[in-house]
């Protein structure tokens, strides 16, 4: 082989190596760009996930607050029912006392009336 042939072969190999390097560099750049895009997409997903997590925490806090409010209202209702029951019992006692007093008054008047009728009968008998 001649020296020029060797040089041509060497130059050809250098050109092929250079082209292969360019292809590899382009592939690396494309993969790097794809990796950057995937990282950006991952960041978007992570941001969305954080937002969803915050929303869930707010919803859980709202539910917790509503449970507290509900329990407070239930306790208030129990207290109101207890007060109402106490008032009802007091009213029943007062009503019973009024009824008893009225019954005593009726009995007293009936006794008095009976006594007066008895006196009247006595007077009638005496007059005759």
Image (spheres, rainbow, N blue to C red):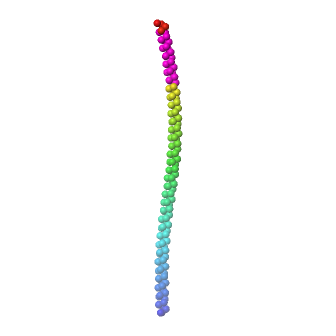
Asked whether residue 105 is drawn in magenta, I would say: yes
The residue that appears at 50% across and 26% down in the rendered structure is 99
Q: Nearer the viewer, residue 89 or 5?
A: 89
The vertical placement of 116 against 94, above or below, is above
* Residue 113 picture location, percent across and down: 49, 16
**What secondary structure do most residues of the magenta stretch adopt?**
helix
* Residue 91 picture location, percent across and down: 51, 31
Q: Residue furthest bottom?
A: 1
Q: Nearer the viewer, residue 20 or 94?
A: 94
Q: Nearer the viewer, residue 101 or 67?
A: 101
The vertical placement of 89 against 73, above or below, is above
* Residue 88 picture location, percent across and down: 50, 33
* Magenta segment: 101-124
The vertical placement of 87 against 36, above or below, is above
The residue that appears at 49% across and 21% down in the rendered structure is 106
The residue that appears at 49% across and 7% down in the rendered structure is 126
Count of numbered labels shown in the rendering: 0
* Residue 119 picture location, percent across and down: 50, 12
Asked whether residue 116 is drawn in magenta, I would say: yes
The residue that appears at 49% across and 68% down in the rendered structure is 36
Q: Nearer the viewer, residue 71 or 30?
A: 71
The vertical placement of 35 against 3, above or below, is above
């Amino acid at each position: 082989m001649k020296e020029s042939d060797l040089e041509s072969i060497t130059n050809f190999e250098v050109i092929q190596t250079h082209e292969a390097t360019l292809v590899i560099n382009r592939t690396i750049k494309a993969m790097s760009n794809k990796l950057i895009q995937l990282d950006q997409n991952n960041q978007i997903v992570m941001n969305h996930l954080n937002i969803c997590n915050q929303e869930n925490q707010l919803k859980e806090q709202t539910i917790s607050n509503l449970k507290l409010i509900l329990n407070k209202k239930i306790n208030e209702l129990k207290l109101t029912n207890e007060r109402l029951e106490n008032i009802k019992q007091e009213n029943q006692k007062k009503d019973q006392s009024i009824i008893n007093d009225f019954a005593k008054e009726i009995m007293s008047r009936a006794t008095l009336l009976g006594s007066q009728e008895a006196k009247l009968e006595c007077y009638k008998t005496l007059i005759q």
